[in-house]
Image: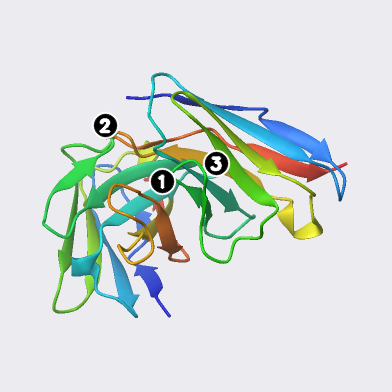
Amino acid sequence: DAQLVESGGGLMQPGGSVRLSCAASGFSVSNNYMSWVRQAPGKGLEWVAILYGGGSSFYADSVKGRFIISRDNSKNVLYLQMDRLGVEDAAVYYCARGLPSYIAAAGKYGLDVWGQGTTVTVSS
Amino acid sequence: AIQMTQSPSSLSASVGDKVTITCRASQGIGSDLGWYQQKPGKAPKLLIYAASTSHTGVPSRFSGSGSGADFTLTISSLQPEDFATYYCLQDYEYPWTFGQGTRVELK
């Protein structure tokens, strides 16, 4: 079964940096598009970033220029490098797998496997 | 960015009720919309993608419809395990955007 496990969250200082990790098992992160979604305490879901198998990436306006999504194919891990953290970045961060081609036809998108989330707190 | 507006923000219903949640996009998005269910303290789960395609293993009581700017998630007969918050997500263009959520509570 496909599984995702996030790590790397914790208490961070405003202006600081952190790198979140998302370890995948049961599938290859390089063969799927992968995304990060966050949820601030008591708030709704916010899409953060996406990385395609071919390497292209896209970001939410709120994180563009501060966050970088990447992967290590050899380790089968997805990352989210978060720089210049602000209090507004405090949230549970989920990684998610994009629907594989054997499930969804080309051009059909969705996030079908999610991790349990890792919590980032930003406070001085 | 495309704005997604869900309605209602919350609703109270009983087991067996038919429940309808709507999602309106600020511009046309074709059929590029998904629906997700989230229970407290848990990760979201994909229910519907491409507006009307049910994800594998999703009970048949969940259905999606719509295209363009207006979409609907219908639960034909609400079950106890369906009390949760539901979100739409447009994947038509970047940045992808979620609706604000609809909380389905027990009446």
Choose between B49 and A72: the one closer to the eye: B49
Q: Under tag 1, what secondary structure?
A: loop
Question: Residue visible at 32% across and 39% down?
Answer: A86
Classify 10 Å Cα crowding around label 2: few (below 14), some (14-19), many (20 and above). Answer: few
**Is residue B86 shown left or right of residue A75?**
right
Residue for badge 1? A90
Residue for badge 3? B87
Choose between B54 and A81: the one closer to the eye: B54
**Pointer 2 with pointer 1, Cβ within 8 A:** no
Residue for badge 2? A61
Classify 10 Å Cα crowding around label 3: few (below 14), some (14-19), many (20 and above). Answer: many
The quadrant holding residue B102 is: top right
Q: CA distance from mark 2 to mark 3?
A: 20 Å
Quarter placement of the N terminus of chain B: top left
| Residue B93 at least partly seen | yes
Q: Amino acid at mark 2?
A: Asp
**Is residue B3 shown left or right of residue A105?**
right
The quadrant holding residue B101 is: top right
Q: Mark 2 or mark 1: which comes first in sequence?
A: 2
Q: CA distance from mark 2 to mark 1?
A: 16 Å
- Where is A26 relative to A85, above or below? below
Q: Amino acid at mark 3?
A: Tyr
Could you say where residue B52 lies in the image, as x and y percent from the top left? 52, 44
Classify 10 Å Cα crowding around label 1: few (below 14), some (14-19), many (20 and above). Answer: many
Q: Nearer the viewer, mark 1 or mark 3?
A: 3
Q: Amino acid at mark 1?
A: Ala
Mark 2 on the same chain as mark 3: no
| Residue A118 at least partly seen | no
